[in-house]
Image (cartoon, helix red, strand yellow):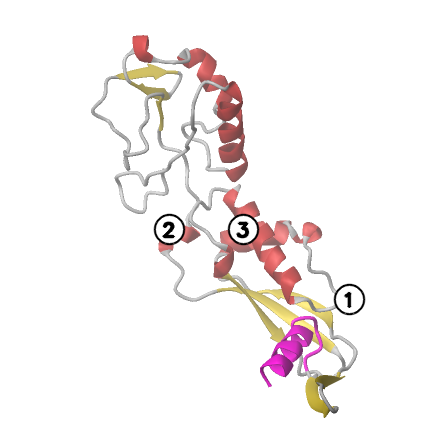
Amino acid sequence: EATTRIIDALFFNNGIFNSFTEYNIVEKKHTAKVVYTCHIHKPYTLKDLILSISDDSIASIIRSESKHSLVKTGDTYQLDLLKLERIRLDAVLKDKGYFYFSPDYLLYKADSLNGNGTVSLKLTLKDSIPKNALMPHRIHDVFIDQDYSLNSDTIIRTKDTLNVENFVFLGEKSNQQVRPKVLIKSVSLRKGDMYSRKNHDRTLNSLRSLGNYKFVRVKFEDFEQKDSGAL
């Protein structure tokens, strides 16, 4: 019975909502086999997608991305595709400053009660989302430590500092492994800019490509003022 439930769940996740699977054990003299019979129907297709996002800013961003959506009317319902679309939308929001957002905060609700083989989808936000996840964040300060230790969990502000073009280098100028004005060319995260996952990844890749460091880490901490929208 466990196997039939797995089979039916697989059908359900691919738009065959009303399937059921039977099994029969066929015994011979020295062997036995299980024969599964699946009763299925034509997969449901997507009739429409309704955007029902309570946060106006997030709704506007998602609406502006609709032409790039992986979920299109007329296509067969596929749960895996909905999961991929949530990941895609999360990446879009991450590039708009929503540092603490997660794909899990997006919820698709399906209605297939119209009886004509189609399903209506409603995209909503889950309940009880943390406040900071609904807030776009800007970069308040950028600290660069060329002598960083993995044992340090927080930015060490007790070191001497060197300010170069809105970047704060920790440590004395003579101890900087790479000259600050050279290093900042590889940093795409800038003070005052909205957080962007693409700039985050670009910074990591650029710093690693320099070949001067055993490891590179970009770490974010909330600004001291709670719910300020600053990192």
* Residue numbers of the magenta segment: 1-17
Query: Can you identify the residue that label 3 sits on?
Result: 90
Residue 148 horizontal/vertical position (percent): 32, 26
Residue identifier under label 2: 132
Taking depth in this image into account, of 34 and 191 the one nearest to the observer is 34
| Sooner in the amino-acid sequence: mark 3 or mark 2 | 3
226 is higher (above) or lower (below) than 107: above
Secondary structure found at label 1? loop
Coordinates of residue 90 in the picture (x, y in percent):
54, 51
Q: CA distance from mark 1 to mark 2?
A: 36 Å
Q: Is residue 138 left or right of residue 48?
A: left
Q: Residue at x 60, y 86 (%)?
A: 1
In the rendered image of this protein, does residue 62 appear above or below residue 155? below
Residue drawn where x is 23% and y is 21% of the image: 159
What amino acid type is highlighted by mark number 1?
Answer: Gly
Secondary structure at badge 2 equals helix
Q: Which mark is residue 74?
A: 1
Q: Quadrant of residue 178?
A: top left
- The C terminus is located in which quarter? top left
